[in-house]
Image: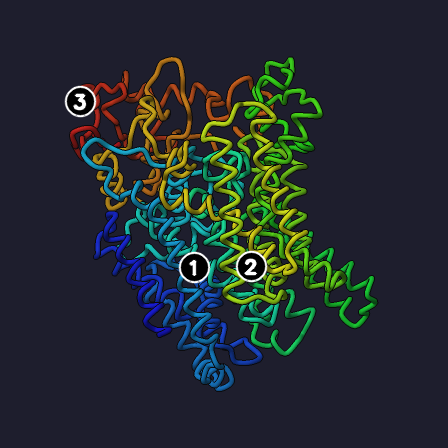
């Protein structure tokens, strides 16, 4: 039965990919990259360092993150060796090396411990099936690999990730790929690993980031989080609950018929729209599990591969810049709990954990992230004030400044209302901390998870980023908080009937209140706030009348089922974020088949350090507006560009605080350089082309939807490729 359930999940995953446009050959190539390249060596590494055996399910879950360590090794070899060994070679060789030593060989080949049981496997498989369903309805079907004859809008961040991956295929220390020579000060480990997975396997770089990576990564996160929850709580129930909280329960949206209401987007959005966040969840969850095992050292913790703590912390440092920062908040509070409880024997280990995580965080800050603040500023409650301006524009007062990022003056009433609408919908999935605080208020492990969650909320509300990326502090912490919440929920006494009853009550309350509130509530404080207050009041009455705390708990969780239902059915009054990000606004020029074809041709024919020049640097073609989020040709060609989309450069994000326009609409800081690149297409001369050649440009790529004097260029340099809407010249 277990094998049948997991086979059904696998076939569902394959089916939705095939049904939404992934070629079968591409899926086979991806399997060739991931299974022997990541899972096999990760599986061997985890078993080699474990102090005790674990069920096969847990071996596979930990293998997903341990395999990323071998993926980083493979990427390093790809860059430094004259011949890049593919993942299907590196992984097996690494495994054979571990098998060569008798001690590790015995561990690797040992019989797995008894599993989770049939019921738990079925529930886990069901949670995965739900995730696959909303990944399909909300993302895959709107993001096919083939843009079609009329072109398609793809999310800007996706093409940016592809461009960064191209940079990591050719260097150990990346620069900003869309502005040749500009430093890059952001996380890049996901891109390095994916660069390795697309080396020698035939996997299309664009398809890897667009569809294959996100749909592979998120199930791995769910499985690993469930396994960590199971070990932390020493209960299989906690693992099942954790998987459900990540996939089945969403935000509480009684305020409007929308997927997320006024709350920040979380799991069901950022699994795809922020691939680095989704990747960051993997090592962050793993490190949290290792910290508990190192500090608690119970019998259940012996099955945790705590020996990987150091490399996993290093992996987390480069996976997402916010990960270790919020996790450090949790480890500090765990240390505080140990001191209060006077557990002196464990305090030195806790101090060592904090010093190491803090030291790695500082090292990363002054190396990987050292060229700027990436637009991050100290601005307490800036996110709340900005949201108040968007929800209640008539209730706030203008700042009086011409600066685009200047915050409005927000009176107390709209401030409190916005705070409630912004934060309260995120709390039901974290409700499990309530029974934990009641029963074990000084448990250091509990404070690790609660402290990480508090740090995520605190940093999000304390700082502000010019592109609103301060939200990623909470996004990084949220799955860790969900693990702690699952632990608390598992401590309650409940049956399947209790779960069904509670979830049904919570869903019914939400549907009734949302129906009375209407699909389009008035844009007023009372219109937005009263439905949520009514839901809280209904839950409070249930808590007073019910004698079973488990029913109340699952009713609270049931209030998040409407959000998931709207993701599944796409019947919300406004599109979800992932869908709206790919809708054609009539202004943005879509990605065309010719752009993809030209990029792939260049990837096959250009030298690894060749630089491109392009004639279009804006997402739209307008003389009055230029949004610099165009990353297409650099991404598809996997090469640096002289100047293309400069939006995410540190220089641009830092200067946004003194700008009167949106950060993505800021002009390029070196107008003479940009003019020289565009002049090579609009008024080409030998002198202009010579200046470009001196900077490393070897290819000129023209989108015929933008100005280009093709005849003049043909007289000066040879044409290398001609497509209906794209022309390539070799310089």
Position of 356 compared to 9: left or right?
A: right
Element at label 3? helix
Q: Quadrant of the N terminus?
A: bottom left
Inspect this view and state whether residue 85 appears.
Answer: no
**Of callouts 1 and 3, the N-terminal one:** 1
Q: Residue at x 73, y 56 (%)?
A: 332
Q: Point out the frontmost of discs 3 and 2.
A: 2
Q: Which residue is mark 3?
A: 715
The earlier-in-sequence mark between 3 and 2 is 2
Q: Quadrant of residue 659?
A: top right
| Mark 1–mark 2 CB contact (< 8 Å) | no
**Residue denoted by label 1:** 127
Q: Give me the disc on residue 201.
A: none
State the residue in front, 495 or 54: 495
Q: Is residue 634 left or right of residue 408?
A: left
Give 690 or 194, whichever is nearer the viewer.
194
Quarter-wise, where is residue 185 in the image?
top right
Residue 410 lies, in percent from the top left, at: 67, 22
Q: Residue at x 46, y 76 (%)?
A: 117
Circles 1 and 3: CB atoms closer than 8 Å: no
- Relative to 143, say whether 231 is above or below: below
Question: Disc 1 or 2, which lies upstream in sequence?
Answer: 1
On the image, numbered disc 2 is attached to which residue?
285
Q: Is residue 72 visible?
A: yes
């Amino acid at each position: 039965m277990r094998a049948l359930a997991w086979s059904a999940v696998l076939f569902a995953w394959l089916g939705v990919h095939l049904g939404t446009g992934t070629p079968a050959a591409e899926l086979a190539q991806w399997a060739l990259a991931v299974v022997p390249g990541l899972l096999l060596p990760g599986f061997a590494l985890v078993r080699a360092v474990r102090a005790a055996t674990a069920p096969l399910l847990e071996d596979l879950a930990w293998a997903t993150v341990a395999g990323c360590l071998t993926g980083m090794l493979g990427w390093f070899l790809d860059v430094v060796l004259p011949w890049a060994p593919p993942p299907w070679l590196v992984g097996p060789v690494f495994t054979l090396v571990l098998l060569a030593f008798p001690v590790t060989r015995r561990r690797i080949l040992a019989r797995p411990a008894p599993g989770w049981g049939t019921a738990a496997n079925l529930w886990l498989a069901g949670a995965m099936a739900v995730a696959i369903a909303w990944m399909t309805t909300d993302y895959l079907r709107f993001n096919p690999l083939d843009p079609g004859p009329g072109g398609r809008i793809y999310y800007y961040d996706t093409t940016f990730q592809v461009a960064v991956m191209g940079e990591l295929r050719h260097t150990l220390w990346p620069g900003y790929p869309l502005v040749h020579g500009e430093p890059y000060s952001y996380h890049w480990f996901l891109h390095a690993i994916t660069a390795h997975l697309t080396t020698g396997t035939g996997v299309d770089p664009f398809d890897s980031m667009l569809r294959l990576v996100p749909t592979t990564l998120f199930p791995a996160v769910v499985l690993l989080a469930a396994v960590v929850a199971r070990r932390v709580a020493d209960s299989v129930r906690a693992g099942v609950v954790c998987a459900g909280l990540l996939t089945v329960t969403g935000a509480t949206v009684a305020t409007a018929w929308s997927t997320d209401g006024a709350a920040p987007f979380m799991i069901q959005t950022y699994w795809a729209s922020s691939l680095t966040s989704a990747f960051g969840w993997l090592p962050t969850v793993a490190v949290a599990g290792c910290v508990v095992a190192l500090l608690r050292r119970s019998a259940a913790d012996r099955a945790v591969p705590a020996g990987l703590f150091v490399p996993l912390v290093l992996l987390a440092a480069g996976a997402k810049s916010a990960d270790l920062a919020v996790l450090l908040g949790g480890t500090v509070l765990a240390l505080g709990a140990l001191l209060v409880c006077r557990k002196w024997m464990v305090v030195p280990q806790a101090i060592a954990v904090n010093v190491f995580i803090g030291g790695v965080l500082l090292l990363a800050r002054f190396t990987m992230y050292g060229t700027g603040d990436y637009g991050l500023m100290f601005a307490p409650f800036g996110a709340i004030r900005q949201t108040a301006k968007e929800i209640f524009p008539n209730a706030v007062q203008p700042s009086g400044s011409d600066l685009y990022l200047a915050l409005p003056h927000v009176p107390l009433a709209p401030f409190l209302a916005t705070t409630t609408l912004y934060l309260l919908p995120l709390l039901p999935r974290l409700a499990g901390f309530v029974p934990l605080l009641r029963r074990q208020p000084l448990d250091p492990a509990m404070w690790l998870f609660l402290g990480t969650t508090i740090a995520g909320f605190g940093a999000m509300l304390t700082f502000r980023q010019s592109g609103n990326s301060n939200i990623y502090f909470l996004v990084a912490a949220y799955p860790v908080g969900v693990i702690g919440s699952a632990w608390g929920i598992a401590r309650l006494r409940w049956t399947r009937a209790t779960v069904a009853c509670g979830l049904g009550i919570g869903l019914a309350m939400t549907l009734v209140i949302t129906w009375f509130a209407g699909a389009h509530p008035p844009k007023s404080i009372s219109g937005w706030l009263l439905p949520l207050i009514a839901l809280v009041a209904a839950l409070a009455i249930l808590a007073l009348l019910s004698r079973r705390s488990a029913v109340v708990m699952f009713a609270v969780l049931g209030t998040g089922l409407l959000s998931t239902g709207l993701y599944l059915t796409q019947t919300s009054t406004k599109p979800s974020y992932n869908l709206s990000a790919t809708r054609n606004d009539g202004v943005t020029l879509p990605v065309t088949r010719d752009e993809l074809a030209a990029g792939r041709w260049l990837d096959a024919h250009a030298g690894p350090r060749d630089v491109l020049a392009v004639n279009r640097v804006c997402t739209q073609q307008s003389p009055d507006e230029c949004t610099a989020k165009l990353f297409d040709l650099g991404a598809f060609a996997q090469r640096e560009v002289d100047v293309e989309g400069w939006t995410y450069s540190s220089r641009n994000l830092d200067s946004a605080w003194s700008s009167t326009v949106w950060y993505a609409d800021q002009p390029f800081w070196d107008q003479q350089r940009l003019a020289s690149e565009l002049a090579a297409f609009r008024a080409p001369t030998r002198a202009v082309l010579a200046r470009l050649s001196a900077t490393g440009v070897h290819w000129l790529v023209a989108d015929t939807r933008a100005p280009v004097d093709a005849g003049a260029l043909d007289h000066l340099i040879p044409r290398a490729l001609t497509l209906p809407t794209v022309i390539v010249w070799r310089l």
